[in-house]
Image: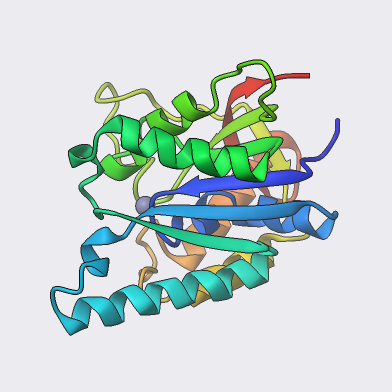
Amino acid sequence: LAEPEVILVVAAHPDDEALGCGASVARWTQLGASASVLFLADGVFARGVDGGKDAELLRRRNAAQRAGEILGFSDVSFLEFPDNRLDTVPLLALVQAVESAVDQLRPDTVLTHHVGDVNIDHRRLHHAVVTACRPQPGRTVRRLLFFEVASSTEWQPPGSAPSFQPNWFVDVGDTLEAKLAALECYEEEMREWPHSRSTEALRALALWRGATAGFEAAEAFMLGRLLE
Ligand SMILES: [Zn+2]
């Protein structure tokens, strides 16, 4: 099975990319892939209403750049849609933003959020990416994968939204430590164990996802579409 070569991660917030697929991206970039990440939601900080929020924006963007270097992203980009309010943005605007990145980067593999997350930005972006990656003639996207984000995906009660049932596992035995190092860049977003967004929980999840598939460690995805 061919490994991804040109990867685009579409994430709502800086830290989602590391939580959701950081170890897989590190694996693929170590194998020679090029990877880009596009963040859509931090506009509430970008408006410059007060200096504290500008500083917060800058801090989080810097964290994303440092995490991106660890994971092997060659391109880390930010759009300024309103944080935690992507439901106030027309879906078409989100679709066009993602389509523009897809047209420019021509990825073979696109990774984004699962549809059933608690976070509204994650759910909204899922729909936008599915629309932007619809398989039309001449499009480059061959694999569409949905990742889980600890402290959002598993917080959705059963029956409230589709549950995350992974069917695509990436062996990250060699790159789990890179993911955890990238998450250290986001120390202000991380929490103490036993919060699910803690280093211990992320390690435990990777071990369990690995054991599910016969690997030392894994990241798990739901396959949206595969074209071969
Ligand atoms: Zn998020």
146, 95: nearer the viewer: 95
Residue at the limit of the structure toward the left, as seen here:
49
Residue occupying the point 45% across, 30% down: 164
Left/right of residue 61 with respect to residue 159 in the rendered view: right
Residue 179, percent from left and from top = 61, 63
Left/right of residue 88 with respect to residue 40 in the rendered view: left
Left/right of residue 211 with respect to residue 134 in the rendered view: right
Quarter of the view holding residue 23: bottom right
Q: Quadrant of the N terminus?
A: top right
Residue occupying the point 79% across, 44% down: 5
> From where the camera sits, is residue 119 visible?
no
Q: Quadrant of the C terminus?
A: top right
Residue 172, percent from left and from top = 72, 52
Residue 195, percent from left and from top = 35, 61
Q: How is the image coloured?
A: rainbow
Quarter of the view holding residue 139: top right
Residue occupying the point 55% across, 63% down: 76
Left/right of residue 165 with respect to residue 115 in the rendered view: right
131 up-or-down from 66: above or below: above
Residue occupying the point 44% across, 55% down: 39
> From where the camera sits, is residue 202 visible?
yes
Residue 145, percent from left and from top = 58, 33
205, 58: nearer the viewer: 58
